[in-house]
Image (cartoon, rainbow, N blue to C red):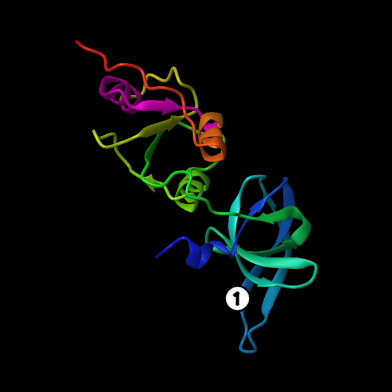
Amino acid sequence: MKAEAWVKRLVIATDRHDATEASAQNTTGEYHWKRTSTTIPAGTIVLVVKETPQNIIFIHGENMYEASKGNYELCKPSEALVGKTFCFTGALAKPRDYFETLITLHGGEFKKTVTNDLNYLVMAFKNSFSRKAQAARDKGIICLEEDDLMLLIKNGQAPTPPPPQTT
């Protein structure tokens, strides 16, 4: 499915806030709202299913929530990452789902392993000693931190790859 077909309904949390969780839908199509709240971290991308003048109803993970529209902004797709492939290693500051969605939103492709056709390995710290990081360095693949990925999306530029290591 092309990103344009679904991206118009994706929004991103602009700051940390609480949202009210919904329970099952009844026969009239209305949702019963629990009075419990869940914290939605800033940077979370969610799928909007319904809008009111003040609120949005959205899906995040397997649950449905309601929150103020003021806490979200529309995700705008671009072609900044078209033809580029990405893989992740280590614990990142935001959930991997966030980065996978962001990469797809901007035309990139997510891969689970480091292969010769990989362009970028995203990690929490460039000095990581993970197996994926070492394999990427050995192949001359560009290693990015999260901030580098955001700059790549914004400016279309990434750091220059190191030369492949010879052993």
Q: Nearer the viewer, residue 17 or 56?
A: 56
**Residue 55 locus on image (x, y percent):** 76, 66
Residue in the picture at 29% in, 34% down: 114
Q: Which residues are magenta?
A: 132-146
**Residue 159 locus on image (x, y percent):** 46, 24
Q: Nearer the viewer, residue 99 or 23?
A: 99
Residue in the picture at 39% in, 32% down: 121
User: Within the magenta stretch, is there residue 139?
Assistant: yes
Determine the image quadrant of residue 154. top right
SS of the residue under disc 1: strand
User: Within the magenta stretch, is there residue 65?
Assistant: no
Q: Nearer the viewer, residue 99 or 92?
A: 99
Prevalent SS, magenta region: helix
Using the image, determine if residue 17 lies above or below residue 33: above
Determine the image quadrant of residue 11. bottom right
| Residue at the left extreme of this rendering | 167
Using the image, determine if residue 63 lies above or below residue 31: above
Determine which residue is flagged by label 1.
24
Task: Check disc 1 and give the amino acid type.
Answer: Ala
